[in-house]
Image (cartoon, rainbow, N blue to C red):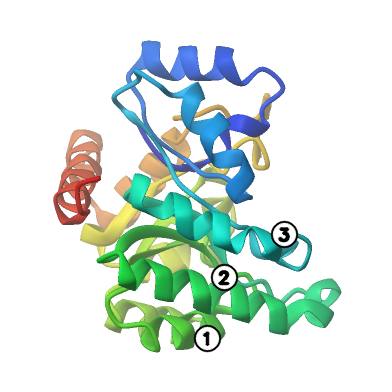
Amino acid sequence: MIDFHCHLDLYPDPRSVVAAAREQGHHVLSVTTTPKAWRGTAALAQGVPRIRTALGLHPQIAHERHGELALFEGLLPETRYVGEVGLDGSPELRPHQDVQRRCFDRILRACAKEGGRVMTVHSRRAADAVLDAFESAPGAGIMILYWFSGSRRELDRAVRLGCWFSVGPAMVRSQRGRDLLAAMPRDRVLTETDGPFASGRDGPLQPGEVSDVVAACQAIWGILADQTAHQMADNLRRLGSMALPN
């Protein structure tokens, strides 16, 4: 299974989670929330060929961690993947909108300077602002909007700009989430969990627990289960071929 947005370092026992993901053969993008966490999180997946570690600075803590931007820029040449980054327009974070935007703009410029990166991007209540920033940073790379919750108009704009999308079980539980999934180009969709923050029937989702998303895609796209799995695998291969080598 493919899990393109998972916080491996934030599980209670990260090493056992990594070991299970390796044994089960899952493809995982392990995202980080601060540049200082990147090396330690990357070390968790050392020698695990199907796990990649993304370099992040989460928008919800950008006002606390913006001093790590220089570290972010220093680490960026070591990875093809960036995340979790972006903007969050939630009411409690409105006092920090300016610092969020400055951080995100600087991250996008750094990515463009390095030739582009694959980015998993947070856009809660801020989809248009995220897309504005992306349009203003040509060459920043490939933007994957994770757990997209914007409007249909914002989704259509993201599609026009070439964005990809990662979709988790929590998203397809609602009719609105399924409607958004139905409007996404199927060749730009990947599965994710957002574990351990998102939960399933038995607690926090573990890497690769995306069968509910596969089932939703199968129903929405009107294809068989093996065809859905093939589509996701083909999407991942194509994305990998578009990412620059380290």
- In the rendered image, residue 95, in percent from the top left (x then y), is placed at 83, 81
Residue neighbourhood size for the residue with mark 1, other residues' Cα within 10 Å, grouped as few (<14), some (14–19), many (≥20): some
Quadrant of residue 25 in the image?
top left
Residue picked out by circle 2: 123
> Which of the pair 230/58 is nearer the observer?
58
* Amino acid at circle 1: Asp
Residue 240, above or below 12: below
Residue toward you, 2 or 29: 29
Q: Residue at x 43, y 44 (%)?
A: 213
Q: CA distance from mark 1 to mark 2?
A: 8 Å
Q: Position of residue 104 (x, y in %)?
A: 55, 73
Residue indicated by mark 3: 65
Give the distance between the C-alpha atoms of the residues marked 3 and 2, in whole angstroms: 18 Å
Q: In the picture, which quadrant includes the N terminus?
A: top left
> Could you say whether the residue bearing mark 1 is in a helix, strand or loop?
helix
Residue 225 at x, y = what percent?
Answer: 25, 36
Q: Amino acid at mark 3?
A: Arg
Residue wearing tag 1: 128
Q: Quadrant of the C terminus?
A: top left
Element at badge 3? helix
Locate residue 170 relative to residue 80 in the image: left or right. Answer: right
Report how far apart the C-alphas of labels 1 and 3 lie in the structure.
24 Å
| Closer to viewer: mark 3 or mark 2 | 3
Q: Quadrant of residue 191?
A: top left
Q: Give the answer, above or below, for where 11 lies relative to 54.
A: above
> Sequence-wise, which precedes: disc 1 or disc 3?
3
Q: Amino acid at mark 2?
A: Ser
